[in-house]
Image (tube, rainbow, N blue to C red):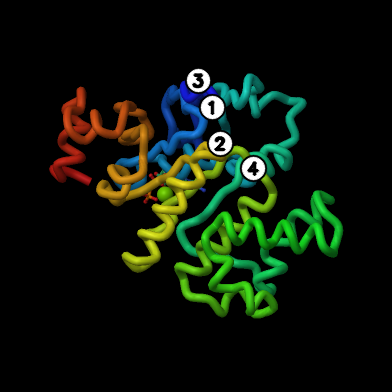
């Protein structure tokens, strides 16, 4: 596997909500099998940017997007691309764990069954088990698979949500502040999980926690007012940023 392979190439990305421009000419190349952190003050466009990567902004009324997001040599905004297939390849985990109001088993099995990836029975059971194992939650739930997903703790629910994302076999996983609602131990488990998962997936995480970016991310992108200010190796961003604005932000002078 070539570590330097570009998985996502974002070129001149602009986004408007009605008349208000929220992203300005953003350009980033995201490498395969790395973790990229997006940091920046509230309202700077991190979630907006993340939602462009799986075309979730298509679901928002009155959004205009220009530019290219090329995943594996194909622009996902080309007319012949079906956004449902994009969302299948680019999974997303949200800030608030959001299991479906279904059993733990059905939370994982629902989408693969719906997409016809497996039929009910042994293969489906196997996929559920593998996904829960990959998300590091199998041992905690293997005897209670019929209990509701919502009956678990927040940290367990978030790992079930990660298992649900993995079950549809994406190649990119987007995480929007996935640990900000969790306690330190659950946070540590999710961070360890991310480091294991990056061998198989390309991961992009939004975080307000600088230490978290430092612990998990290979690359870090700093956004401010809808612009990408600086994008570099995480160490460089935190120890020796090129731009004054980045330095001011990471040293807590604003934000
Ligand atoms: N659905 C929407 N409709 C209109 N404006 C929006 C919408 N979502 C976000 N915005 C605006 O776009 C800008 C960027 O918002 P975004 O949610 O991407 O920021 P963020 O960096 O994720 O912030 P936070 O750290 O608080 O989550 C903000 O000015 C916000 O008000
Ligand atoms: Mg956000």
Q: Is tag 2's residue or tag 3's residue first in the polypeptide sequence?
A: 3
Report helix, strand or loop for mark 1: strand
Q: Which residue is mark 3?
A: 11
Residue 30 lies, in percent from the top left, at 47, 28
What number is the disc on residue 53? 2
Residue 212 lies, in percent from the top left, at 31, 49
Disc 1 + disc 4, Cβ < 8 Å: no
Left or right: 233 as drawn, with respect to 99: left
Q: Is tag 4's residue or tag 2's residue first in the polypeptide sequence?
A: 2
Left or right: 95 as drawn, with respect to 246: right
What number is the disc on residue 170? 4
Q: Is residue 18 visible?
A: no
Residue 254 position by quadrant: top left
Q: Is residue 117 above or below residue 9?
A: below
Q: Residue at x 57, y 32 (%)?
A: 64
Report helix, strand or loop for mark 4: loop
Q: Is tag 4's residue or tag 3's residue first in the polypeptide sequence?
A: 3
Q: Which residue is mark 1?
A: 8
- Nearer to us: label 4 or label 2: 4
Within 10 angstroms of label 4, few (less than 14), some, or many (20 or more) residues?
some
């Amino acid at each position: 596997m070539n570590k330097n392979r570009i998985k996502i190439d974002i070129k001149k990305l602009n986004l408007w909500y009605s008349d208000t421009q929220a992203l300005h000419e953003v350009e980033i190349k995201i490498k395969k099998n790395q973790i990229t952190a997006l940091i920046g003050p509230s309202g700077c466009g991190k979630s907006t940017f993340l939602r462009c990567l799986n075309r979730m902004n298509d679901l928002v009324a009155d959004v205009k997007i220009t530019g290219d997001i090329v995943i594996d040599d194909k622009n996902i905004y080309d007319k012949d691309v079906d956004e449902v297939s994009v969302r299948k390849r680019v999974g997303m985990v949200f800030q608030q764990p959001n299991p479906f109001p279904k059993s733990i088993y059905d939370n994982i099995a629902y989408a693969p069954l719906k997409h016809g990836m497996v039929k009910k029975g042994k293969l489906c059971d196997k996929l559920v088990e593998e996904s829960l194992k990959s998300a590091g939650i199998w041992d905690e739930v293997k005897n209670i698979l019929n209990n509701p997903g919502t009956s678990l703790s927040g940290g367990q629910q978030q790992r079930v949500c990660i298992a649900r994302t993995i079950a549809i076999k994406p190649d990119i996983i987007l995480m929007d502040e996935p640990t900000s609602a969790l306690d330190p131990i659950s946070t540590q488990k999710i961070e360890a999980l991310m480091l294991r998962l990056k061998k198989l997936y390309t991961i992009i995480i939004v975080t307000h926690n600088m230490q978290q970016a430092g612990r998990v991310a290979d690359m870090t992108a700093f956004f401010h007012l809808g612009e990408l200010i600086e994008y570099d190796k995480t160490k460089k961003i935190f120890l020796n940023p090129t731009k004054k604005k980045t330095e001011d932000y990471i040293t807590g002078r604003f934000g």
